[in-house]
Image (cartoon, grey):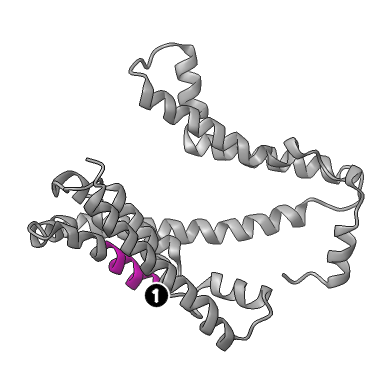
Amino acid sequence: MDARLEDIKNTSLRPAKELPPLWFSVLPVLIPLVFICIHTARHSLSTSNTGIWSSWIDFLGDKNIALVLGGVAALILLIVQKRNTKEDIGPFVHGALMSAGGIILIIGAGGAFGGMLQQTGISQRITELTRNYQMALIPLAFFITAVVRTAQGSATVALITASGMLSGMTQTAGLPYHPLYLGLAIGCGSKLVPWMNDAGFWIICKVSNLTERETLKTFSPMLIIMGFTGLIVIMLAARFLPLV
């Protein structure tokens, strides 16, 4: 975002032969995606957990190992791309770690907060209060997420916090619809309400060259409409297509 227009133009005019091939460019994303999907598919479709291949799949498909391998592939890509230049890869790695570190801290804090709320037994209490009004759990999940999102700005933290609070209901509430609808309601609730405490708000504001007032008049109402539209669709689907 801080790059000069001249630098962006020069980058866009680089010849294709100086760029890495497509398969190499997407490798950091494909490695964790493929390994995790294979691991999940094996555990979903097979009951046998023996054999050397099963052990390798369990090892490489572990989300932490798979993501580390993706990170290693990205680092190799950067080294190969910079090998013929005088640029040091240190600043690039440092910038990436700084950005990722903040995201990891936010997600970790949200997960810890959600876990603490779950330990209080709040999900069981909500289940008891809504036992005869289980369709109300969907808008409840939506508004809990929306409140957390509006208060602290991070959709990721709101998702993790609400999921931690409501996760116990999927086993104890005896829902008349698939728990997937609760997860979708949490996702829709995470769209409300983006304003100045949201990093995404500032990305849209600065990249689109809008003022804060213009962003509040356009971007924020758009996400609010998206969230409530999703809530309505989810409630209708849970009522007429419960998937159970």
Q: Residue furthest top?
A: 51
Q: Is residue 146 magenta?
A: yes
Residue 23 percent across, percent down from the top left: 73, 35
Q: Secondary structure under badge 1?
A: helix
Is the stretch drawn in magenta largely helix, strand or loop? Answer: helix
Q: Residue furthest front?
A: 240
Q: Is residue 121 above or below residue 17?
A: below
Tell me where residue 28 sits by quadrant. top right
Q: Amino acid at mark 1?
A: Thr
Residue 96 percent across, percent down from the top left: 66, 55
Tell me where residue 21 sits by quadrant. top right
Say which of 236 and 204 sits in front.
236
* Residue bearing mark 1: 150
Relative to 56, 202 lies left or right: right
Q: Is residue 104 magenta?
A: no
Q: Residues within 10 Å of mark 1 (few under 14, many from 20)?
A: many
Residue stretch in magenta: 141-149
Q: Is residue 114 visible?
A: no
Residue 10 percent across, percent down from the top left: 90, 62
| The N terminus, quarter of image | bottom right
Residue 24 percent across, percent down from the top left: 74, 37
Q: Which residue shows up at 83% across the image and 65% down it?
A: 8
